[in-house]
Image (spheres, grey):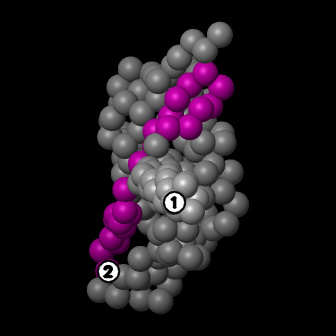
Amino acid sequence: MRTVLLFLALCAVNFSFAQDQEERDDSFIRDNNKTLLKIDIKEPFMQVAVKCNDFKPAAYEGGVAAYKDILNKYMYAYLNSDFYALTGDFTFTLVLDAKGKVVDVKGMPKVQNSEVFFDDMQYVVRRIKKNWTPASCGGQPVASQIKVKMNFSSMSADID
């Protein structure tokens, strides 16, 4: 009987230690061919206001969190980061027309190889088919700009 109780006690202790969970950072590193990416998109997005007494900012269906999720997903899927290894904070300005469509994407700061990254980001943002609800001034839709800040890190690795 003691042997059975000792065995059950050891099983219970092992099982309890096996249930310990570590906190995971799901946004950390994903493998993209031979390039490791880390993307951290910051909230809130900054709306560049138009001079107007009754300005209403542009909005995305589902809010900033929904746009952030789809942007993050598309960046991992469509960035061709084999051509650049960048690390740092970047700001992208999404230029919206009066219909809420993204018509341009501008990236800053300009560093070595960042132009290729900025071109890739234009492609990524244009792949998102859902438009924004446009900003309005006095009840009339107007063109606007939204600034998206992110920390981006890409490292090339030879896995062969």
Q: Which segment is the magenta one?
A: 29-52
Q: Is residue 40 on the magenta stretch?
A: yes
Q: Amino acid at mark 1?
A: Arg
Q: Nearer the viewer, residue 111 or 43?
A: 43
Q: Residues within 10 Å of mark 1 (few under 14, many from 20)?
A: few
Name the residue rendered at 62%, 31% in the picture.
32
State whether residue 96 is above or below residue 126.
below
Badge 2: few (under 14), some or many (20 or more) residues near its Cα, within 10 Å? few
Among the two numbered marks 1 and 2 on one chain, the one whose residue lies closer to the N terminus: 1
Query: Relative to 98, does residue 156 appear above or below in the rendering?
Result: above
**Which residue is depicted at the point 54% across and 73% down?**
60
Query: Which quadrant holds the C terminus?
Result: top right
Q: Secondary structure at mark 2?
A: loop
Using the image, tell me which numbered label, if any, was put on residue 2.
1
Residue under pointer 2 = 52
- Mark 1 residue element: helix
Callout 2, which amino acid? Answer: Cys
Res 4 quadrant in image: bottom right
Return the residue nearer the eye: 107 or 11: 11
Q: Position of residue 71 (x, y in %)?
A: 56, 54
Whether residue 35 can be seen here: yes
Residue plotted at (36% across, 82% down)? 55
**Residue 63 is inside the magenta segment:** no
Whether residue 115 appears in this view of the structure is no
Please provide percent x and percent y for residue 17: 45, 53
| Image coords of residue 109 (percent x, y) | 33, 35
Q: Nearer the viewer, residue 72 or 112?
A: 72
- The numbered disc on residue 99 is none
The mark lying in front, picked from 1 and 2, is: 1
